Image: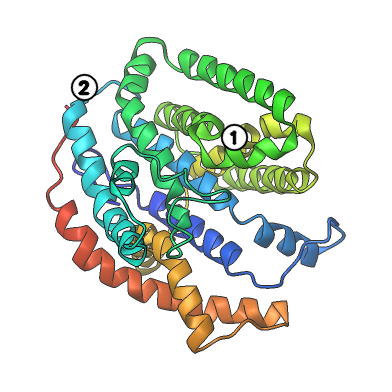
Amino acid sequence: MKTLNNTYLSRLDHLRFFAAALVIIYHCRGFLKYNNELSGPVDFLKLWITGGNSGASLFLVLSGFLFCVISNAGAKNISYGCFIKNRVLRIAPMTVLLCFIAISVNRVHSDPMDILRILTLQLNTGHATTGWGQQYYPIGQIWTIAVEFQFYLLFPFLALFMRNDGVKTMFGMIAVMLMVKYSLVIFKGAPIYGIFYHTIIGRMDQFLIGMIAGYLYLRKEKISFTVAAVFLIVAISGLTSVLYFNKKSIPDFVTFSFTIEAAFWALLIYAYCSARFSMNQRVDATLAYLGGLSFSMYLLHLPIYYILQRKLIPMDPNPTMHLVKVILVVIPVTILASALTYAYVEKPFLKLRVKYTK
């Protein structure tokens, strides 16, 4: 996503598209199951598909990374009001559209609390397993918007802390969040994972780790393709391990799961953005454009998937064939719908953004 406040990094948009695709495949996986084994490439793919909700973590780490780079690790002065205005212009149009669809569908029982939920960033509450509104229209994935915006409210302060003492405060805050999570695991056990998953309590350190990665990116030279490849292999191996242990529901691992996951995503982001390699200009532009659509893709894929299930591609009992249909039909249709909402819902508001750094 191009910004008025920094040099554009198209590779971040590439990763946004990857994150959106990962989440879409996860939500639309049908009957595909992972059998708690890692004996070959097929098991590896099953683990990643059934753990594809990790794409949400990639989105959050990317946010921390991007805003750290935009602020030059806090070296630039940030206008708090202008920063928040831009964030509202970025997320409110699509969010409000979907929320009012849910409110309209539930108009008989809807009350002013629904509006208050939007205004107070409580979209990650009101449903046992996902975000508010899923019971009325398939928009449960909006829970991430609440968590993201809570981070936005804090970021200008975090940038100041980074300017004053580098990453020391970031690491200290991560330690505090781990302490809080450990206490909750002791009280509630492994099922607390779902609470961590949907709230800033579980996700705050992912933003902070993204900021630390951005800090390192700003201070290091580009790395060779070979070094980047090694980093990517380590990151993917580490993420695979996290996904594997997440399936085990080990209470002691739950405390550290999101933190370790974020660290490996941060390594992947750093490697991809820092690597010295050239990319075909058309491929780069296409991936960047698709990354620009990622917000709409993330919000629209479930309604589109359920519509296509009813009208065109009913659930296939063969998991492989179902996955092929998702890749060849659901994702392209989601991209087309997202191109429409990006052009006529998101973009008009994005043109109203202002410069918030100096």
Q: Position of residue 331 (x, y in %)?
A: 48, 73
**Towards the viewer: 152 or 118:** 118
Q: Please tell me whether residue 105 is drawn above or below residue 319 in the rendered image.
A: above
* Distance Cα–Cα, label 1 vs label 2: 27 Å
Question: Which residue occupies 51% across, 49% down?
Answer: 127
Write down the quadrant of residue 345 in the picture. Answer: bottom left
Q: Position of residue 166 (x, y in %)?
A: 42, 15
245 sits to left or right of 7:
right
Question: Which residue occupies 52% across, 35% down?
Answer: 203
**Towards the viewer: 5 or 37:** 37
Question: From the image, which quarter does the C terminus lie in?
Answer: top left
Coloring scheme of the render?
Answer: rainbow
Q: Are marks 1 and 2 in contact (CB under 8 Å)?
A: no
Q: Which residue is mark 2?
A: 77
Write down the quadrant of residue 66 in the picture. Answer: top left
- Residue 331 visible (yes or no): no
Q: At label 1, which amino acid type do we have?
A: Ala
Q: Please tell me whether residue 358 is drawn above or below residue 4 in the rendered image.
A: above
- Outermost residue on the bottom side: it is 312
Instruction: Please rate how many residues cluster around mark 1, counting C-alpha atoms within 10 Å: few if below 14, some from 14 to 19, many from 20.
Output: many
Question: Which residue occupies 47% across, 14% down?
Answer: 169
Q: Which residue is mark 1?
A: 263
Question: Which residue occupies 44% across, 51% down?
Answer: 132
